[in-house]
Image (spheres, helix red, strand yellow):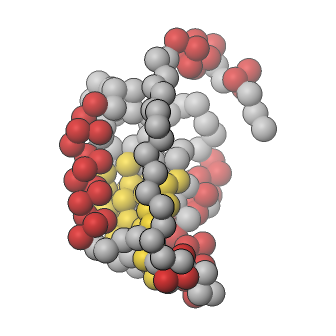
Amino acid sequence: MGDTSEFSLAIRLFLRAYPWRRIDPVPWAPLKKPLSQSRLALVSTAGMVLPGQPRFDETIKGGDCSFREIPAATVPGQLVDTHRSESFDHRGVQSDPNLAFPLERVLELAARGRIGSVNDRHLSFMGSITAPGRLTRDSAPAAAALLVADEVDVALLVPV
């Protein structure tokens, strides 16, 4: 496991001064049926987009809180890493997008009967949102409404 000494001085200073939020109690919804009968959707903060989708806008102060829909039929190798953070090495995600958007692994779990089904769409957000007000007020409820409309039982959050 790495530590902050691996980061540049600028990143270390940013992380030290960042006003981390504490959420208490942590929101939690118990699973209403076994995973083997549940519909699952991926929600990643890897900033992945498909060719032809707009990249996340790095010029938005506090971060781009929008999200992109990623169809289940997507070949993960098509996904483009647009994550703005310099605090991690992007080479792993670029060589195997399943590290940040594990669509092939989820499909394998469904094929083995470990999860009931895979949703037709998944969601990609940009991580590294330093001003999350718009995210919690606008984007997260819109994303949740899509997943509720799709009758998703489990959203697997893959934070990056």
* Horizontal and vertical percent position of residue 23: 45, 32
x 41%, y 70%: residue: 153
x 46%, y 51%: residue: 28
Report whether residue 29 is seen: yes
* Horizontal and vertical percent position of residue 27: 43, 45
- Reply above or below: 135 against 118: above
x 29%, y 24%: residue: 61
Question: Is 110 left, or right, of 68 in this rendering?
Answer: right
x 28%, y 56%: residue: 143
* Horizontal and vertical percent position of residue 131: 34, 26
Quarter of the rendering containing residue 122: bottom left
Quarter of the image for the N terminus: give it: top right
- Find the residue positioned furthest to the right: 1
Quarter of the rendering containing residue 133: top left
Quarter of the image for the C terminus: give it: top right
- Reply above or below: 147 against 144: below
- Reply above or below: 147 against 119: above
Question: Is 17 left, or right, of 39 in this rendering?
Answer: right
* Horizontal and vertical percent position of residue 80: 44, 56
In the image shown, does 64 or 84 lie closer to the viewer? 64
In the image shown, does 142 or 14 lie closer to the viewer? 142
